[in-house]
Image: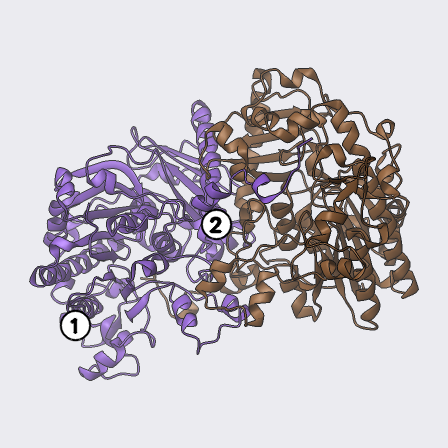
Chain colours: A purple, B brown
Amino acid sequence: MTPLRNVLFIMLDQLRWDHLACNGHPAIRTPNIDALARNGVSFDSAFVQAGVCGPSRMSYYTGRYVSSHGVTWNRVPLSIEQLTIGDYLRPLERKMALVGKSHVIADLDGLARLGIGVDNPVHRQISQGGFDVIDRIDGHGSPDGDSGYTAYLLDRGYTSDDPWRDYVVSGMDEAGKIQSGWFLRNVRLAARVAEEHSETAYVTDTAINYMTSQCEKPWALHLSYVKPHWPYIAPAPFHAMYDENDCLPIAKLATELEDPHPVYAAYLAQEESQSFAQDEIARHVRPAYMGLISQVDMHIGRVVDTLKRLNLLDETLIVLTSDHGDFGGDHWLGEKDLFHDAVTRIPMIVCDPREAANATRGTRISSLVEAVDVLPTILDAIGSDYVGSPIEGRSLLPLVFGQAKEHKEFVISEIDYSFRRVRRTLGRKPHECRGIMIRDARWKYVHWQGYRPQLFDLQEDPHEYMDLGTSTVHQFIRQGFNEKILAWHSTRRARKTLSDQVVEKRTDRAKELGIYYGTW
Amino acid sequence: MTPLRNVLFIMLDQLRWDHLACNGHPAIRTPNIDALARNGVSFDSAFVQAGVCGPSRMSYYTGRYVSSHGVTWNRVPLSIEQLTIGDYLRPLERKMALVGKSHVIADLDGLARLGIGVDNPVHRQISQGGFDVIDRIDGHGSPDGDSGYTAYLLDRGYTSDDPWRDYVVSGMDEAGKIQSGWFLRNVRLAARVAEEHSETAYVTDTAINYMTSQCEKPWALHLSYVKPHWPYIAPAPFHAMYDENDCLPIAKLATELEDPHPVYAAYLAQEESQSFAQDEIARHVRPAYMGLISQVDMHIGRVVDTLKRLNLLDETLIVLTSDHGDFGGDHWLGEKDLFHDAVTRIPMIVCDPREAANATRGTRISSLVEAVDVLPTILDAIGSDYVGSPIEGRSLLPLVFGQAKEHKEFVISEIDYSFRRVRRTLGRKPHECRGIMIRDARWKYVHWQGYRPQLFDLQEDPHEYMDLGTSTVHQFIRQGFNEKILAWHSTRRARKTLSDQVVEKRTDRAKELGIYYGTW
């Protein structure tokens, strides 16, 4: 099959699986993402490897599980030796361009140890996780020197020492007073930035300029929106597009609060959970969150139009996904981190324009897939053989081409809550805060370091209300999952400095090399 | 307590725990190692993290388990980002000098990716795993440019294009014909090299010169013998010091061959096992192996004499250990790799000259300890705080000072037999060859990727003859060990680019940084 020329890897930040019209949300309007789903395959059971940005994204970018790439939490540096999407594309003479968020934190200690100073071009490449940064905005803070966004805002008259803070994430109340969108009470105000100057618009403009400028060259672009991640405040008209009545039901039951798992209990006590556990707050915030999603959707329409205009739709693989979801009050929780589907299940749409993909075009695939499968899918689409590399995921193209029906028996997600207040609530040390989720089509099981496990029967209890972690009759189920996690650990690519192909060549070669240790 | 000035970290290669007089061997003579044991602490239950050189040594040098440092087999490069003993000593203004074997393989791909060429001093440092190489001989092959041994031999009249091959590991038979010590039939001949020019003597001379040359400077030296590793041929008089009657009983039972575990069965079929399974071959080789041990012991006496002469015995931590054992026919096996105590249990002697260690001087400690504990022990002795680093071991000094009685509930060892012929025998792919052993005071349990587990009751069956891996009554024992391995995985230091101390400082700091995600 002819490899595809271009890759457009679109990520939204903090987008729940169920907050797209094509995934069944009855009120939200996402016509452009819906159109992508119609033109490609929508994976209905796609899961991230962690419920927070940094670890999850590093799994997308390295194709490896969190325990393997080592970025167990936000702002943990990505170790210098981890190969990323940029490294895998380089031999194919493509750069992995980045517009928007990557959340890659440079391993400055590692670089310093190797004597790689800031004046060395390798420093920038490694610091950026192998991305060729066109414009990097990591969100929820004023962009730094890797973005032109601050200058762009100042040029357009958003005068301030911090235009992001004062315009992009601030609104004006009825009394004419400026209010910060950091606070949940203010997120329904219109952001003071014009929609066409918002982060979402700016990132889209930059991506469109990039694609247009590439002319005949093959390209790969990570278009990585910082929204609908908090601060939840949206620019007009999206700030007022939805109201309380448009929200999905908040998935929570009073029984969840009876004898909760200790880690869950510690999360319930966090301020964000105390806020979002109040229905009126959850229903106040969710419409703003939905507005941000519809805004991104509108701009994705512009991106697809650009591909059409450039006549590139037939030569471009499009992947659209998210780095994790958002509790938004589900399970009495705010924010993310934990393993409920609200957080770990994400949209994943793959549009392969080639004829082979017609077999599944417009269909939904329910087989379990993971974030680590995206990098190998991209490599597969552009004709790179990643098999035997440190990549721990597997290409989704056999599913997209209808050649395979099943992909994975289970998915894995991990947590390290050591940076969170919950660690102190629980009185634990920084290296005692790990948890691992295994989820198959029927069950979700969580193994906690130092605590009893959790278990949910997703068939009987699809909303994960009833923790069967101590249920006597489910003892063998839990034990079976312990064994599956253990077996999964054996499959992780610990040996990352030699490919399987080299191992194959070197197998049983001692005598060839003149080494005899058992010959009489 | 005053930190110690110097470190002498002595390693023998392929030395079994039971092949020292001080560990109960009735025939072998190892007076100098016995003296070290009398002057320090002898750990009776010390285990390596892998049963082959490369992975085991990298666990010693990084303080990390094999799955964590990634060198799953011999000649797998040590990834550029792994911190080693040299990195930990550098801030203390000490180099980790190497004389002898390290088995570190340079991660040339990793260095090339970072643009670190051979002319960059960092290249050498990283290629050598952080060691300051005084003279490196990795054994079982002619030394390369990191050693002066070939020139040394040529200078002394061992004329050949490969004096190592033709003199050091060759003998002369009764007919005056040169025979290769690579072949087991020849290992009882005297090596053609004079004892004082052998590898063991050369390495010792080099180490003595190094220690002597340091004068008043604090130093740390890894004195790493390549013996008694094969080729087993020893120089006179050590080649004839022992005979068949001096061998320990070969630990094997016919019942071991009935319905053997598939991986064990594949190892039984290897040539080295087919040879060593013959009593006459095992008893032919073992006396040579014992001679090599006594030879190293003699030279260790010279090293200790040097410390005395330099008046450094009171200021030097001495650790003596081995990277793994040798089956030598036990369990019908030759060579190593698998998890029997013949391979994974090694001698470990720690001599701390300080008064605090008098409490245990000359005693034996039966608590389980591991190879990964050696690096933290060294760091602890010279006053470095390693806690919170990526090191996964723990200092043994609390045991040495009599402050603690117990150290670890269990030990872990791992295998990746992908480079071995057994992989082909079993029809497996390179990433399907992992096994993990967990051993406590009573049991040894092995979890195999793709195969049933193994279980041995060391109380009832100290020689590990009876595999209880399928025994119905032991189902809960096996299950308990699965859970312990799983819990152990959670304790591995996946986050290696940030210390626990940094995590502590950064915990729950969002609001300080102006980030609000849950405040009304």
Q: Mark 2: which amino acid?
A: Leu
Quadrant in which the C terminus of chain A is drawn: top right
Instruction: Give the SS element for disc 1.
Output: loop
Q: CA distance from mark 2 to mark 1?
A: 63 Å
Where does the image place residue B405, in percent across and percent down from the top left? 77, 43
Q: Residues within 10 Å of mark 1 (few under 14, many from 20)?
A: few
Q: Residues within 10 Å of mark 2 (few under 14, many from 20)?
A: many
Residue drawn 49% across the image and 28% down it: B426
Q: Quadrant of residue A515?
A: top right
Where does the image place residue A456, in percent across and percent down from the top left? 36, 33
Q: Which mark is residue A498?
A: 2
Name above or below for residue A380 compared with residue A121.
above
Residue drawn 23% across the image and 72% down it: A168
Are discs 2 and 1 less than 8 Å apart at CB? Answer: no
Q: Quadrant of residue A464?
A: top left
Q: Which mark is residue A174?
A: 1
Where does the image place residue A141, in percent across and percent down from the top left? 33, 70
Camera-nearest residue between A360 and A234 = A360
Q: Quadrant of residue B213?
A: bottom right
Precedes in sequence: disc 2 or disc 1: 1
Name above or below for residue B475 compared with residue A194.
above
Q: From where the camera sits, is residue A64 visible?
A: yes
Quadrant in which the N terminus of chain A is drawn: top left
Q: Mark 1: which amino acid?
A: Glu
Where does the image place residue A364, in percent across and percent down from the top left? 17, 39
What is the chain identity of the residue bearing mark 1? A
B94 on left or right of A40 = right
Name above or below for residue B514 compared with residue B76.
below
Residue drawn 34% across the image and 57% down it: A85
Callout 2 and callout 1 share a chain? yes
Q: From where the camera sits, is residue A416 visible?
A: no
What is the chain identity of the residue bearing mark 2? A
